[in-house]
Image (cartoon, rainbow, N blue to C red):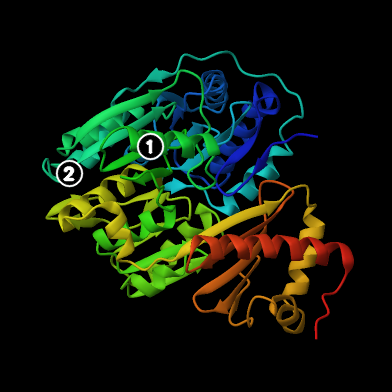
Amino acid sequence: MSSLKFGTSGLRGLVTDLVGWPSYAYATAFFRALASEAVAVREVVIGRDLRDSSAGIAATVASAAAAAGLTAIDCGAVPTPALALEGMRRGACAVMVTGSHIPQDRNGLKFYRPEGEITKADEAAILAILGDVATVGSMGPDVAATPEPGALDRYQRRYRDAFAAESLAGLRIAVYQQSSVARDILANLLAACGAEVVTLGRSETFVPIDTEAHRPEDIAFIRDVAASARFDALVTTDGDADRPLVAESHGRILRGDVLGLITARYLSADVVVVPVTAGSAIERAGGFERVLRTRVGSPFVLAGMAQARRDGAKAVVGFEANGGFLLGSDVVVDGRALPALPTRDAMLPILATLAAARRMGVGLADLVAGLDVGETASDRLPDTPPAQSSRFLQRLADAEFRRAFCRPVGEADAVDMQDGTKIALGGGRTIHFRASGNAPELRCYAEAGTVGEAEDLVRWGLTEASAAMKDGPVLRE
């Protein structure tokens, strides 16, 4: 059975399941899906991250493009948002070869229409057409794609034009380069904005940086860097640079949804679109005209932003709990234009967060403290079959069961069941259960006033969920 599956953003799976014919077949299905809609594209721009398998898979995608009658444009190793920007500029579709933050033995494909990321409906269309592509067929001949080095330059120029040369003056920033495809341009852009930049931790082997579920070794590395020298911040990204990681001067990593909140305020957004896993501080501290909640995954955030624009909103942004920021409208920052880029991006929240702190003359820790964002925690029950998670979530949908289940930790208040079940417990606390879209596991998220309280809620939630799934109804006096 193949591990390949569409998740919250793109197709992912084991490299052994993706190389060769499978990547050719999925790319072919994508091109046929566009043709079936009469989408007028003649070119496909192709990019990749720095993991070992990505260059070969990109070459396979180029062969599939040629067989479909498209001109393949090779943008090389570029951030995913840079590739999306180039596709939009050319009116071309795009395929990014990346596994994002997952380990080196896995990889994936991200597909883009000329106007941006594909939707869930597009994913369904690709899967439907995939069934018509022969299970094992003959791949087209190898194709030398046309190189396009300018895509990376245009992406950098986007932010050089939007952020003034002195916007980060006086800040000393550590750039953890590791194997991020943006490791050089991140350092270049920070320096162009006036920061003193120190690069460190460059790796020629792939490092799976997850900006939401941090590995212990990454946490330790960042804290050691902070303790070894004075930095105002340490910054990095995941493998394809669509998720940011920012740590303050003492080495504490800032939550991705907090980076999104700061960036949205810096851009003077009217409407913010976020998934249900993002913290409730966005409503409490944001000062926005409207906050729209969606299911988890960038396609749902994109759909929410499109709806907000149809409703007449002028400055629409979106972001996820992992920090990936989507700019849904053209905006003006300090008199400088920043065009819309409706796909997850790491560069904008890094630059905007640092610029916001510098403008206010405070450190990142003080900037965050002024927002009253509370604390969050999360964990999971691995090896939990989807059917088992589904039955538990269905039981939580029953008000009587939900009240009995939550009684030891609080009164079950408001509930949001867009994606799993998110329950308000009072006192600014929430607990949220949802089935993973990528793996057989039940995930639990919590918010509270302190880290300890949030972690205790998660531990309690997973223990009780496990018991409920094994032992039947929760009965309490």
What residue type is disc 2 on? Leu
* 67 shown above or below 360: above
Q: Earlier in the sequence, mark 2 or mark 1?
A: 2
What residue type is disc 1 on? Thr
Residue 198: quarter of image: top left
**Cα–Cα gap, marks 2 and 1:** 16 Å
Residue 92 seen in render: no
Q: Position of residue 82 (x, y in %)?
A: 36, 36
Residue 71: quarter of image: top left
Q: Position of residue 4 (x, y in %)?
A: 69, 37
Disc number placed over residue 168 in the picture, else none: 2
Residue at the image position 44 percent from the left and 28 percent from the top: 47
Residue 49 seen in render: yes
Towards the viewer: 211 or 219 = 219
Towards the viewer: 25 or 420 = 420
Residue matched to label 1: 236
Towards the viewer: 461 or 205 = 461
Q: SS at mark 1?
A: strand
Q: Position of residue 319 (x, y in %)?
A: 42, 56
Towards the viewer: 456 or 188 = 456
Residue at the image position 56 percent from the left and 18 percent from the top: 56
Residue 469 as seen in the image, left or right of residue 303 = right
